[in-house]
Structure formats: C-alpha cells, structure tokens
Image: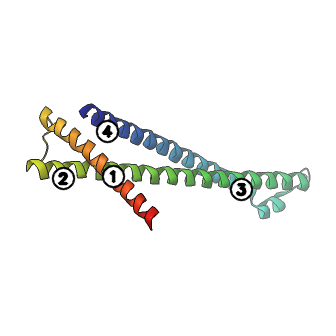
Amino acid sequence: LVQELIVSREKARAREEALAARSELLESETARMRKRIEANSHPLLDPERLTSRVGAGEDRVRLGQKLAASEARLQETVRLLKAKEAACEGMQAKLRKVVAGEERRIKAENEAFRACMGRGPRQSSGMDARAMSALAGFLREARANETLITELQLENT
C-alpha cells in the first residue's frame, strides 16, 4: 500500500510535470505567433501608404494582391493563436483540477491519520507510511461506497 501511494504520487507529479511542460510549450508557441502577427502588421502594409508610394514601375494590382495575401496570413495566424491559447487554458484548468484533487486527497489522509494517531505523520517513519497507506485504502473504499450509495438512492427515487 505504501508503494501504491508512492507510485500514485509519482504518477501525479509526472502528470503535473508533463502538463506544465506542455503549458510552457504552448505559451512559447503563443509568444512566437504573437511575434509573427506583429511582424505581419508592418506599417508598410498599410493600404494608405501602399497607394501613395506606388510609383511608375510598380503595379498596383500586384501590391494589392500581396496585401490581401498578407492580411489572409495574418487572420489565419490570429485564428491559430486563439485556438492554441484556448487549448493551453484548457490544459491549465485540467492541471489545476488534478493538483487540487491531489491536495484534497493528501489533506484528507493527513487528517484521518491525526484523528487516529493524535499527531501528524512523520516523513521518516516506516510505520507512519504503512499506516498512511492503509488509511488511503480505507478512504478510497469509503469514497467508492459513498458513490455507490448515492447511485442507489438515485435509482430508488
């Protein structure tokens, strides 16, 4: 049971680290996309400046097409950026939910230990670790039984 608790905590930490790494990757991608947007919104692409600078050798139609293509790329980049930001926010929310759940579980286990032993668990004690593991199992069973009771009550009403 101690090993299960340790393994579950390690898995939770690994998930947290993976989600944090993914979040950092998405944030860097967001920053990169913002830089691309800023690069595409150069003052030389302003329609007023383009039409006023068109000289004898330049073709207005060609410049207009370039401008339209640049605007289309800019809009696509903005759309992709918003989609990636939404995905990042979703992952961050999911990570916060996982972390909060783990914190609640650990707090409940510590409170149950205190209620039984009259003191908090010691990190270096093997006996405390085994007791915490047993309590964690009992708490898991209690939550499963509560869920089952709630489902049965819903069926009977």
Q: Earlier in the sequence, mark 3 or mark 4?
A: 4
Q: Examine the rendered structure and indicate whether residue 94 appears above or below residue 155.
A: above
Which circle's residue, 4 or 1, is located before the other in the chain? 4
Residue 132 location (% of width, % of height): 20, 41
Q: Is residue 125 visible?
A: no
**The label number, if any, that marks residue 145 in the structure image:** 1
How packed is label 1: few (under 14 Cα within 10 Å), some, or many (20 or more)? Answer: few
Q: Nearer the viewer, mark 3 or mark 2?
A: 2
Q: CA distance from mark 4 to mark 1?
A: 23 Å
Foreground: disc 3 or disc 4: 4
| Residue located beneath label 3 in the image | 75
Q: Secondary structure at mark 3?
A: helix
At x 13%, y 53%, the residue is: 115
Q: Which mark is residue 111?
A: 2
Distance in Å between CA atoms under marks 2 and 4: 18 Å
Structural distance between the alpha carbons of marks 1 and 3: 53 Å
Circle 4 residue? 9
